[in-house]
Image (spheres, rainbow, N blue to C red):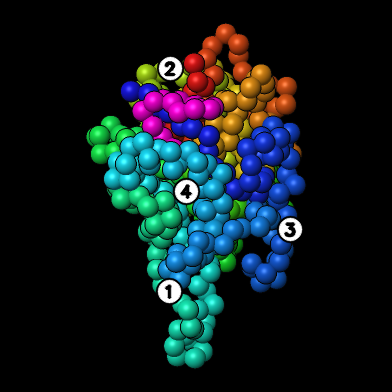
């Protein structure tokens, strides 16, 4: 069965509205990626921070739920609030579910509280541990919207919010609900950034996915919300055609070198959607800019799409939003699929110096267009630590 994804709410380094994100995405703008100090001692890092204002949480919710993670989530939710509340009124609060992905869940906001505890022997006034637990984003959203249906958070590293969309489809398949609010949120976190720095996987300068000069990732932040339903609502929509997931469990932080898990996820997604590789018009690559991920993904892509397919990584535009990355890239694919009267593809932003040791991929440029002879269908890939892999397939509204 085909399910529908309405207009998403999106907050990321590219902005906080469909129009400005669309423009930045399709012109390959990296203006949201800025050098920032204070995250890793002695280094100035290029990060994809959202630079706009965030809204305060509604009265009665701040004590338990206030965090930057939830404020970004609220900003994304406010963009599609009318749609969400219409669905709740139509189906009932008990028949609307929430599935979100995150990795840090606002823990950075509480770093000061732990320092206070270490120095003073007690928590600071107003500290509430519930703000940083993994369930926090879903608990906040359910409280804000008054939802009583199934609600939970997934944390599978960089596939978290992509898996949230797969889980949303499963909830609808099992008739546990009639609509699912799905997506994810992750904000910049000093602990996470220092962790990647300790792995020597983070680049001071703008990342360059698949380049011979690639030096690592740029971390970003984002919040993304979709409403998934069995029938299309009013306004623009894309179809959720299928998805696949795998876990090759190769290594804690490195993917299986030949891309076995990534290949399995992509092939399962194609099978789930009833499609062949030749049916895919464009692939949103995971493309982090690290040595091992890019090597693995290029080999996996070359295996699944042996005849080639236009593809691009958007990490140089948004940074790697970790637990929110899968939903963010699905949202960017959604924008690309639903552009009225425009068939251009997002460009792959890099230094255009391919690694001669890797298969050459067909990286999309501003000159690439959807093929007019076939339906617009895109695949979005997310690969994570621990060998966790997810591929999603979305299509344009017929």
Q: Looking at the rendering, which quadrant does residue 136 occupy?
A: bottom left
Element type where label 1 sits in the image: loop
Could you tell me how far apart the alpha carbons at marks 1 and 2 are, in whole angstroms? 50 Å
Mark 2 packing: few (<14 Cα in 10 Å), some, or many (20+)? few
Could you tell me how far apart the alpha carbons at marks 2 and 4 are, in whole angstroms? 29 Å
Is 156 situated above or below 358? Answer: below
Nearer the observer, 353 or 319: 319
The mark that comes first in sequence, 4 or 1, is: 1
- Residue name at image x 45 percent, y 71 percent: 63
Evaluate whether residue 337 shows in this view. yes
- Residue name at image x 50 percent, y 44 percent: 81
The kind of secondary structure the magenta stretch mainly shows is strand
- Residue name at image x 47 percent, y 19 percent: 277
Evaluate whether residue 300 shows in this view. no
Element type where label 2 sits in the image: loop
The mark that comes first in sequence, 3 or 1, is: 3
Q: Which residue has dot 3 on it?
A: 35
| Residue mark closest to the camera, 1 vs 2 | 1
Q: In this view, does 247 lie to the left or right of 17?
A: left
Provide the residue span drawn in magenta: 226-243
Q: Which residue has dot 2 on it?
A: 276
Is 230 situated above or below 82? Answer: above
The mark that comes first in sequence, 2 or 4, is: 4
- Residue name at image x 37 percent, y 52 percent: 146
Could you tell me how far apart the alpha carbons at marks 2 and 3 are, in whole angstroms? 42 Å
The mark that comes first in sequence, 4 or 3, is: 3
| Residue mark closest to the camera, 2 vs 4 | 4
What number is the disc on residue 128? 1
Q: Which residue has dot 4 on it?
A: 184
Could you tell me how far apart the alpha carbons at marks 4 and 1 are, in whole angstroms? 22 Å
Could you tell me how far apart the alpha carbons at marks 3 and 1 are, in whole angstroms? 32 Å
Element type where label 4 sits in the image: strand
């Amino acid at each position: 069965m085909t399910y529908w994804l309405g207009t998403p709410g999106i907050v990321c380094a590219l902005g906080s509205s469909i129009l400005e994100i669309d423009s930045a995405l399709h012109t390959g703008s990296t203006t949201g990626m800025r050098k920032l100090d204070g995250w890793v001692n002695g280094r100035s890092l290029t990060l994809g921070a959202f630079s706009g204002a965030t809204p305060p949480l509604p009265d009665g919710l701040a004590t338990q739920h206030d965090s930057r993670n939830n404020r970004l989530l609220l900003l994304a939710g406010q963009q599609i609030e009318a749609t969400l509340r219409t669905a709740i009124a139509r189906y009932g609060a008990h028949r609307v579910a929430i599935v979100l992905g995150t990795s840090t869940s606002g823990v950075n906001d509480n770093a000061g509280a732990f320092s206070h505890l270490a120095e003073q022997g007690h928590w600071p006034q107003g500290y509430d541990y519930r703000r940083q637990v993994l369930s926090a984003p879903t608990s906040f959203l359910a409280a804000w919207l008054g939802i009583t249906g199934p609600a939970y958070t997934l944390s599978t590293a960089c596939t978290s919010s992509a898996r949230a969309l797969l889980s949303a489809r499963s909830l609808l398949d099992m008739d546990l609900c009639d609509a699912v609010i799905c997506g994810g949120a992750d904000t910049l976190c000093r602990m996470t950034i220092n962790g990647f720095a300790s792995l020597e996987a983070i680049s001071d300068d703008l990342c360059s996915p698949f380049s011979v000069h690639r030096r690592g990732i740029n971390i970003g932040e984002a919040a993304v919300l979709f409403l998934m339903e069995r029938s299309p609502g009013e306004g623009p929509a894309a179809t959720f055609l299928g998805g696949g997931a795998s876990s090759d469990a190769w290594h804690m932080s490195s993917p299986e070198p030949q891309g076995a898990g990534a290949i399995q996820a992509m092939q399962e997604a194609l099978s789930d959607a009833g499609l062949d590789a030749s049916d895919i018009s464009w692939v949103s690559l995971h493309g982090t800019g690290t040595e091992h991920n890019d090597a693995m993904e290029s080999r996996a892509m070359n295996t699944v799409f042996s005849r080639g397919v236009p593809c691009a990584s958007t990490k140089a535009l948004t940074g790697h939003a970790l637990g929110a990355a899968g939903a963010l890239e699905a949202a960017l694919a959604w924008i690309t699929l639903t552009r009225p009267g425009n068939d251009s593809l997002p460009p792959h932003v890099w230094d255009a110096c391919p690694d001669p040791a890797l298969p050459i991929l067909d990286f999309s440029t501003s000159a690439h267009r959807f093929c007019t002879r076939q339906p617009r269908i895109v695949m979005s890939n997310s690969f994570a630590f621990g060998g966790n892999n997810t591929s999603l397939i979305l299509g344009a509204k017929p």
